[in-house]
Structures are given as structure tokens and as C-alpha cells.
Image (cartoon, grey):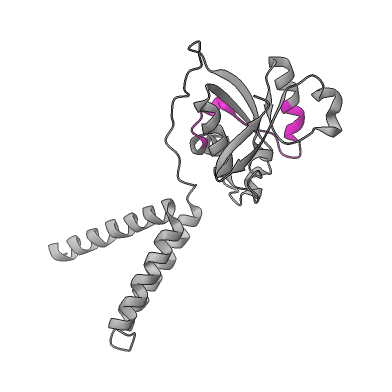
Amino acid sequence: MEPLYVLTASVLLLAFVGYVGCLSRIYWVTVLATGAVGFYAARSVPPDTDNAIVWATAGVAFLAALMVVRVLPKTAQPRQKPPQGKRGKSKDIVIDGTNVIYWDGDADLDTLRVVVRHLMEKGFAPIVFLDASTRHHLKEPSLDARGFARILGLRRDRVMVCPAQTEADAFILKFAKAEGLPIVSNDRFGDRAQQAKGLKLVKGVLARGKPILQGL
């Protein structure tokens, strides 16, 4: 094979990998930029029989990149060491993750990530519980506990995905009561009032992307 062909193929492959990376990190910015470039190119070099192969190849590459991004897990956030509390030790706190993902409207894992980071900055060490169905609410069926932990910037042992066909509430309340920990959730746990009795509940909202917590 001619060296020029090898070099060209290598450059195109690297360009494709870089484009997929941009899509996985800034999806809509990349899509809009692609549309703008495509519109400009179409005005300068309108599609016709002479350049049909070039336009078809570009279209196939774009669709292939979208398909690759769909099967990749969400971009992992860099793992950060939890800030230390006033006495040099972070304070454990339980998070009802399946509840928190809805604090800003539709289910969004970034909402939970923002709340986790906020608590870490306050000197807390979050322990996140999630229903098994959470991954389907987020339309990310391939996510497991390890994937959630990577995205949230937590150690694997700080994220618990409860077994299928169970409710995380029972596990949350039992663990929080046994350890004497507060729970971050807007759930009133009305159907488990006896279990929730005596536990400290921390409620919250997101205002302009920033968590406001009541009860800490």
C-alpha cells in the first residue's frame, strides 16, 4: 500500500475519533457547528453528480459518529477527592439519587452530579442510592453502579444501585437509620413513615443550576 494512502487513512481515522470525542462532550455545539459548516459548504459546492460520493461519504461518517456516541457511556467526570470537613474528616450523608435527578424537571444525571459536588464542597462525603430503574429514566440502560460512580466523581463503594423490582427507599431508610445519617431527598417517605421516623431529611431545589438545601 502506498505510504500516502496509509497517511491519508490515518489522518481521517484520527479526525473521526476526534469528532466523536467532541460529540460525546459537547453534543449540541458540535451538531450545530457541523450543520453550519455543511450549510456553508453546500452553498460553495452544491451537491451534484460530480461530487455525490464526497457528500455521501460525509453524510455516512456523520451518521456513524452519532451511532458511536449513542453506544458510548456518558463522558466520565474527573474523580475528585472530597473536600475535608472542619475536623479533617468528611461527614457521610445519604442521597436519594432517583429523587434528586428530578429536582430540575426531567430526569437528568447532571442534576445529581451538581448536588453531589455541592455537598462535597461543604465537607460531606455523599453515599448515593439509586433505584435499578434510574438508568431507564435517564435513557442510559447500560449504566451500572461503576458507571454512575465515574460520572458522579465518587468511589464505587459510595454508589448503590438497588436490585431490580425493589424500591431504593427501603434500603435508604434502613442504612440511614443504622448509621445515624441525614438523607437528601424531597420524598416524604409517607408510605414508610415508621421507618423514616426520627431521621433528618434535607430537602432542596436547583436555582439557576445551583443547589439550595434546607435542613443542613
In front: 154, or 111? 111
Magenta region: 152-172
In front: 104, or 196? 104
Q: Position of residue 178 (x, y in %)?
A: 72, 16
Quarter of the picture holding the N terminus: bottom left
In front: 169, or 214? 214
Classify residue 112 by image quadrant.
top right
Compared with residue 75, is residue 10 higher up or lower down, i.e. above or below? below
Furthest-left residue in this view: 3
Q: How many marks?
A: 0
As for residue 28 lying within the magenta part, the answer is no
Looking at the image, residue 159 sits to the left or right of residue 20; the answer is: right
As for residue 160 lying within the magenta part, the answer is yes
Quarter of the picture holding the C terminus: top right
Residue at 77% x, 29% y: name it.
170
Looking at the image, residue 116 sits to the left or right of residue 78; the answer is: right
Q: Position of residue 85 (x, y in %)?
A: 51, 16
Q: Position of residue 87 (x, y in %)?
A: 50, 10
Classify residue 56 by image quadrant.
bottom left
Compared with residue 185, is residue 31 higher up or lower down, i.e. above or below? below
Compared with residue 168, is residue 62 higher up or lower down, i.e. above or below? below
Residue at 72% x, 39% y: name it.
164
Q: Position of residue 186 (x, y in %)?
A: 72, 36
Residue at 70% x, 15% y: name it.
180
Furthest-bottom residue in this view: 49
Can residue 2 be seen here? The reply is no
